[in-house]
Amino acid sequence: MSENLQKIDHSALRVNQAMIILLSILAFIINQAWLALLVGLVMGIGSLLKIPGFGWIYRRLLKPRGW
């Protein structure tokens, strides 16, 4: 059973969740439907690929800087 389990980077998941929340709130505050649509598209693509949609922000920007 354990051979079917994948390693999960919990930091990437947290960054993904934070980006979804922050961008959704920002879209609401500045009344920009396109931003909410963008968040939805990134979430959908992430679901199809079975990866955090905004995980690239963590992997490419935050992790290399030691954040």
Image (cartoon, rainbow, N blue to C red):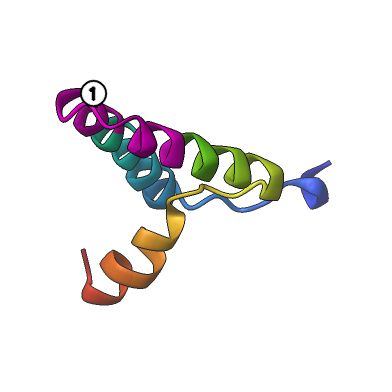
Residue 34 shown left or right of residue 1 in the figure: left
Helix, strand or loop at mark 1: helix
Q: Nearer the viewer, residue 10 or 3?
A: 10
- Residue 47, percent from left and from top: 64, 40
Q: Which residue is at a point 21% across and 63% down the rendered structure image?
A: 67
Q: Which residue is at a point 59% across and 46% down the rendered structure image?
A: 46
Residue 15 lies in the magenta-colored region: no
Q: Residues in magenta?
A: 24-39
Q: Which of 47 and 63 is in front in this view?
A: 47
Q: Which of 30 and 44 is in front in this view?
A: 30
Q: Quadrant of the N terminus?
A: top right
- Residue 37, percent from left and from top: 45, 34
Residue 28 shown left or right of residue 4 in the figure: left
- Residue 54, percent from left and from top: 43, 51
Query: Vertical placement of 22 versus 15: above or below?
Result: above
Q: Residues within 10 Å of mark 1 (few under 14, many from 20)?
A: few
Residue 38 lies in the magenta-colored region: yes
Amino acid type indicated by mark 1: Phe
Magenta stretch prevailing secondary structure: helix
* Residue 62 image-quadrant placement: bottom left
Number of numbered discs:
1
The residue most toward the bottom is: 64
Residue 53 shown left or right of residue 62 in the figure: right
Q: Which residue is at a point 43% across and 62% down the rendered structure image?
A: 56
Residue under numbered circle 1: 28
- Residue 40, percent from left and from top: 49, 34
Q: Which residue is at a point 59% across and 50% down the rendered structure image?
A: 51
Query: Vertical placement of 40 versus 6: above or below?
Result: above
